[in-house]
Image (spheres, grey):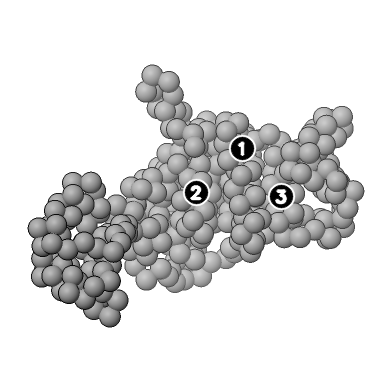
């Protein structure tokens, strides 16, 4: 995964930055002054419950919607004073594939090339290269209407890349895909970032953020309530423990007496000892068991995952209030 620093320890330039972004729809405040800094050549994931403002953030940063307040720059250009330059430097893939089902895969790509005003020769060359890159050369002349969900998303992402953007916004790009297609998309995102592209990802699949993102921000109630690496967010949540399972009831009883603070599961002969399972703590735990003259049948360390962190950071995981749309147009 790309790092956010250059050689010599200097921070990478920001591909996306925002200060105090605000947006309301009627009396509903969707964004209440959010700040962002996303290094170039990295994957940034924005998480949040339905209606939290993820799509609105993408719409503002991609100049599809005007903010009510605050300022942002994308690829070094102001979204307020230089929106055309922002649009020339970005690609946007919304929640639903923006394809013309009557056109073939190649024709969809050529249409995008025409919209971007590429020369005919360059457009044909770019389309051929993207069809090969995305493993779709053999279906280049088949209509998009015949494609599976995974193929449609691949073609949709390929269309986003026709203009060779510096920054790509992926708004819940794998919604509705089967696990195999989702992992194919992940591999494509990784290859983009390896080539220096910056990816701004919104997703409700926490495993997706865990797998792809260099940094994650959690949006709730219109504010960024936490930001950091996946590991950073996981450490904010209590609940880590060491699980000890015994097969002999007498040994289980002696272990429980030696570890009076452990949570008991008498039916399964299991003890759960709170802690993050670091080596010193594990060594001390085993010493206590050794002193009691007992040995666990097996030992496992359980740490909170990103799902736990998300639920803890967003309360009940719901955000109320109207949203004008959940789809981001291209």
Does the rendering let one see residue 204? yes
Q: Quadrant of residue 62?
A: top right
Disc on the earlier residue, 2 or 1 = 1
Q: Nearer the viewer, residue 92 or 311?
A: 311
Q: Which residue is mark 1?
A: 192
Residue 132: which numbered mark, if any? none
Which of the pair 206/327 is nearer the observer? Answer: 206
Q: How far apart are labels 1 and 3 at the CA level?
A: 13 Å
Residue 215 to residue 57: above or below: above
Residue at the spot of label 2: 211
Whole-number angstrom distance, CA of label 2 to CA of label 1: 15 Å
Point 61% across, 44% down: residue = 187
Front residue of 315 and 58: 315
Residue 251 picture location, percent across and down: 18, 70
Q: Is there any visible trace of residue 86 in the rendered image?
A: no
Which class describes the residues within 10 Å of circle 1: few (<14), some (14-19), or many (20+)?
some
- Residue 154: mark in rendering: 3
State the image coordinates of residue 255 (x, y, percent, origin top left).
15, 67
- Dividing the picture into quarters, in which one does residue 99 lie? bottom right
| Few, some or many residues within 10 Å of mark 3 (<14, 14–19, 20+) | many
What's the residue at 23%, 78% (across, down)?
266
**Left or right relative to 90: residue 222:** left
Q: Is residue 228 left or right of residue 246?
A: right
* Number of marks present in the image shown: 3
Q: Earlier in the sequence, mark 1 or mark 3?
A: 3
For residue 160, what is the image quadrant? top right
Under circle 3, the secondary element is helix
Where does the image place residue 105, in percent across and percent down from the top left?
A: 83, 49
x 82%, y 56%: residue: 144
Give the left or right position of residue 128, taking residue 89 as reference: right
User: Cβ–Cβ below 8 Å for labels 1 and 3?
Assistant: no
């Amino acid at each position: 995964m790309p790092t956010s620093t250059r050689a010599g320890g200097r921070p990478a330039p920001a591909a996306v930055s925002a200060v105090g972004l605000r947006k309301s729809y009627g009396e509903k405040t969707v964004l209440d002054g959010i700040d962002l800094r996303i290094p170039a050549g990295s994957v940034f994931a924005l998480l949040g419950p339905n209606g939290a403002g993820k799509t609105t953030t993408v719409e503002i940063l991609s100049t599809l919607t005007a903010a009510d307040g605050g300022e942002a720059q994308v690829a070094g250009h102001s979204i307020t004073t230089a929106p055309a330059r922002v649009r020339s430097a970005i690609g946007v893939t919304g929640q639903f594939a923006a394809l013309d089902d009557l056109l073939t895969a190649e024709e969809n790509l050529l249409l995008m090339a025409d919209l971007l005003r590429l020369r005919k020769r360059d457009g044909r060359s770019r389309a051929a290269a993207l069809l090969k890159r995305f493993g779709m050369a053999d279906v280049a002349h088949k209509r998009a209407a015949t494609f599976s969900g995974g193929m449609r998303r691949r073609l949709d992402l390929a269309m986003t890349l026709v203009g060779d953007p510096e920054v790509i916004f992926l708004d819940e790009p794998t919604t509705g895909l089967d696990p195999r297609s989702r992992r194919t998309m992940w591999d494509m995102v990784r290859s983009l970032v390896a080539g220096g592209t910056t990816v701004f990802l919104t997703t409700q699949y926490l495993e997706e953020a865990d797998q792809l993102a260099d940094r994650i921000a959690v949006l709730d109630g219109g504010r960024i309530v936490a930001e950091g690496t996946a590991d950073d967010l996981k450490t904010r949540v209590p609940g880590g423990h060491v699980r000890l399972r015994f097969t002999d009831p007498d040994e289980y009883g002696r272990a429980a007496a030696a570890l009076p603070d452990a949570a008991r599961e008498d039916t399964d002969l299991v003890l759960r000892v709170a802690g993050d399972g670091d080596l010193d703590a594990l060594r001390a735990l085993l010493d206590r068991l050794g002193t009691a003259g007992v040995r666990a049948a097996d030992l496992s360390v359980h740490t909170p995952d990103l799902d736990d962190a998300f639920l803890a950071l967003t309360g009940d995981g719901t955000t109320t209030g109207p949203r004008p749309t959940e789809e981001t147009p291209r």
